[in-house]
Amino acid sequence: MEVGFLGLGIMGKAMATNLLKHGFKVTVWNRTLSKCDELRELGASVGETPAAVVARCKLTIAMLSDPSAALSVVFNKNGALEKISSGKGYIDMSTVDAETSIKINEAISSKGGHFLEAPVSGSKKPAEDGQLVILAAGEKSLYDEAVPAFDVLGKKSFFLGKVGNGAKMKLVVNMVMGSMMNAFSEGLVLADKSGLDPHTLLDVLDLGAIANPMFKMKGPTMIKGNYAPAFPLKHQQKDMRLALALGDENAVSMPVAAASNEAFKKARSLGLGDLDFSAVYKTVKDSQS
Amino acid sequence: MEVGFLGLGIMGKAMATNLLKHGFKVTVWNRTLSKCDELRELGASVGETPAAVVARCKLTIAMLSDPSAALSVVFNKNGALEKISSGKGYIDMSTVDAETSIKINEAISSKGGHFLEAPVSGSKKPAEDGQLVILAAGEKSLYDEAVPAFDVLGKKSFFLGKVGNGAKMKLVVNMVMGSMMNAFSEGLVLADKSGLDPHTLLDVLDLGAIANPMFKMKGPTMIKGNYAPAFPLKHQQKDMRLALALGDENAVSMPVAAASNEAFKKARSLGLGDLDFSAVYKTVKDSQS
Amino acid sequence: MEVGFLGLGIMGKAMATNLLKHGFKVTVWNRTLSKCDELRELGASVGETPAAVVARCKLTIAMLSDPSAALSVVFNKNGALEKISSGKGYIDMSTVDAETSIKINEAISSKGGHFLEAPVSGSKKPAEDGQLVILAAGEKSLYDEAVPAFDVLGKKSFFLGKVGNGAKMKLVVNMVMGSMMNAFSEGLVLADKSGLDPHTLLDVLDLGAIANPMFKMKGPTMIKGNYAPAFPLKHQQKDMRLALALGDENAVSMPVAAASNEAFKKARSLGLGDLDFSAVYKTVKDSQS
Amino acid sequence: MEVGFLGLGIMGKAMATNLLKHGFKVTVWNRTLSKCDELRELGASVGETPAAVVARCKLTIAMLSDPSAALSVVFNKNGALEKISSGKGYIDMSTVDAETSIKINEAISSKGGHFLEAPVSGSKKPAEDGQLVILAAGEKSLYDEAVPAFDVLGKKSFFLGKVGNGAKMKLVVNMVMGSMMNAFSEGLVLADKSGLDPHTLLDVLDLGAIANPMFKMKGPTMIKGNYAPAFPLKHQQKDMRLALALGDENAVSMPVAAASNEAFKKARSLGLGDLDFSAVYKTVKDSQS
């Protein structure tokens, strides 16, 4: 199967590499073309423009940094849209909002192409290991066609229905995660201020019904006050806000998510927005000594 | 090692059985003495009263249903206290409040005995499998002496310092758990009302950084509306309240735990207190159709 | 002074009437022109279209039901914009969002006109009595020019700076009001369930430092379960949401407003959105008897 | 009518003075007896001990600083209880918890006396002006007997039923007040950070449906950062906590009060507990500049 791949950032490079290693023929493009060299050495072809990639491949995957990049790769001059035609498939695996997905979907569809949004759960390491979780939504036939590629890129892919559902699912997951991070932070601080060793709390938690990788991985660094950003707090807070907005649309009252969102906002107001989202712990902890 | 065991409810019977199976000599007592028969068949001796058990054993473990039972077994006529003397050890593994532990500790100590509170994390199945998590606090020398028994009863035991710390650790863990249950419930309802399949959310969660046994086990039954009580909601809410009170003492602000506590209170007000604590999901979900 | 007046709904009619009674020459327009008759009898002139009114008057006031009406009166064929020219003033006293105000402002300014947004606090009765509170923002010179009219329409007018500030001030006020309504509801229910007479609570509150007209007016009807809509709950919740969004922009953490917003959302989910915003009391109160 | 008066602190002195000025015969006692001199000059008799006062008067009022003072004046040697006998009335106007009231009530009643708890709303100035609000509960016949005195001490007195109801009513009022203070603080900060003048917000609020003396009085000092304690934040937070505990007993979910309580706790953790309760504003406001 011949696959186009647009965007060779940290995630995209790892993903395109995996496709090549598993025998896919891949044509890559990146805004800074020199970043294509490494992939070329692994056997990839290089397209000069997004349009050139789409012209050549029946199926094109995009993995871009944000909504504006995702839009410009489609709509700019020499963008993907110019060569979309009946039967071509375009899969955007970037994390974008529902509006962006819907806009791209309409443009692709109006030219007879098929579209799938397919944001992923997981960052650099899972991308390298082919262990992403893929939340796809849009054209079911395109999903079926893409399954062999998804099987290489991720440990599991889901087809979630109409365009927008992939983004929504990601918001729901991140909302639960954000509330859990707050609950965890409160627990660590309560233990500490009550004379218990927070490290022991980590050990106890890890043996029980709520043991999970996030507590295990983040706990020790939080206690040390190390908040190197894996997922920046301001992005986590934005996702909480969007999840609450989704709840607003559907009249779902979510007081715990709302309290968590305000805690993240407090952290932002204290200048912690660019640190890891676990830095909310710092705002719970800080007190007059 | 000869060990006394007071209280043969669901938990106590499983625990005493494990001790017998692993070669401990055990003398048991239960308020309804007939419940001792099964243990006797497995090789246990039977004591007529708590005092009789303590008289016979250097180390006595109690596993009782609530604080008032824990107190009466010690302080009533023919209670454990009557035969406590220098060098005797008394370990209360019941889940009781700090005041109860402290009161028992003072009485035991005043007669030259040693005391340990050792509440456990885990219910029937882990008790049977010797997979409890034991949160011990009190006399360190008694803890060291009890380690062989703890190794049989649990997969891990912790020594947490002075009496009261075992109860506190349990409150912190249950507080985090209660907030997580609320976050989880909000996520399930948001998914559902936003047109996503809650079962798919369970699958996605189970593949990510916040995957944990509780979500995996409770999720499917919650979606079905099955709230058979493993841990009654009113007890979970009581623990949230006590954890918030502990935060109050130590000036720890915990807005997410507070919001979760109010959600559990709403559930209580709607008559769900005797159901499983996962029934808080019902109060998040219910709306005018 | 000659003033144009667009929109003769409940509020607009009362306001235009006041202007006439205080000696202003007024030219009115309403989408359903027959509604102008009553004003004509009081001495008003009638314009056939918004454009016709603006052509005739140096200063035109609009009081329309919602943002879309506010926009169409300006931008539609024969709309106010067609006859705006250098020196003309246009004052929109409708309650609209900041975007709407900004859009109208840009259009008016681009033709040399002056613009003021001037939402009001107060409903029918204060409008009739000339007791509105006017929250004006935009062109200061136009505000100065409009002061004689504002003095007739309201008991007090404020000039708040640039366009958008009027809407923001209204959001802040409504946010405080929404949280107070929740606090009040919780107090009434707590009194009731604790064996105190809620009517006595009203009496006690009315004698103290937090006595206010809203508690006095709404309390008795809330206790009766009468939620005839003066300010619909769904609009109150929308304002809470917008105020929280304003807080999000400016990194202001507002946990009490957030908790109140979720309570209003719960009320919406229970089908109370079209009732008065005091119906949030019902969601606090309802329990299994 | 002859009235005993125990406790001549700021409040008690003002109250006893008012009774004297309105023609009551008053016998006073204070722990530091020299404080009685001023009252003696106004015509009061002085008792050497609480017992001596009760021996002399059919009706005795106590106004003490806290529960422990309230208890010791009754139960200590030469305490009020020694001379309570059939037909004597004892009215405790101190602010104490329900347990304290109940304990005093039982002791007084067991000797044939009558008891009333009667905490007040209002501080120094209203006490001097006879403008307190009196929340009485207990023996109705004693209330009726005390009405002439209450009419002098307060602008209004309420009879609320059984002992404990006075304390409960005060908690409910203070809970609503605490939530309002948080809502107000959030509004002031939101205004400020959104580019609006907080003083203008005060003016707008003061003209509307939620205008109240607290906003008017506290607003300007809060903006200045002046938190001289009229009602210490730690006491306000304690009352929020007790009100939430009352809600817990009665299964009343109060998410807004809970969020407010956590905000006050945050303020305590930042060392603001001894300042006025309006200092919660500071925790909402502080951010990284």
Image: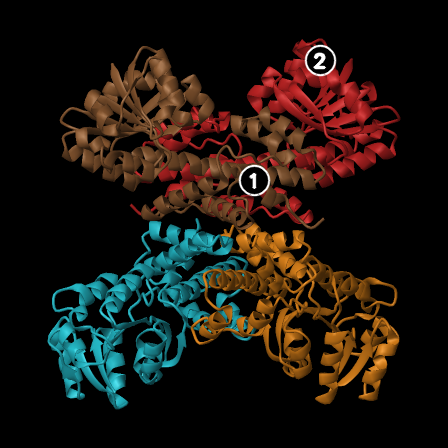
Chain colours: A brown, B red, C cyan, D orange
Which of discs 2 and 1 lies nearer the camera? The answer is 1
Q: Residue A19's image quarter?
A: top left
Chain letter of mark 2 equals B
Q: Chain of mark 1?
A: A
Residue B32 position, x and y percent, is 66, 25
Instruction: Give the residue pinned by disc 1.
Output: A279
Residue closer to the observer: B191 or D73: B191
Q: Establish if B3 lies above or below A216.
A: above
Amino acid residing under circle 1: Ala
Q: Identify the residue position indicated by label 2 in the image.
A: B44
Q: Is residue A249 left or right of residue D115?
A: left
Q: Quadrant of residue A108?
A: top left
Q: Residues within 10 Å of mark 1 (few under 14, many from 20)?
A: many
Q: Are marks 2 and 1 on the same chain?
A: no
Image quarter of the N terminus of chain B: top right
Taking the spot 82% from the left edge, 24% from the top edge, the residue there is B141
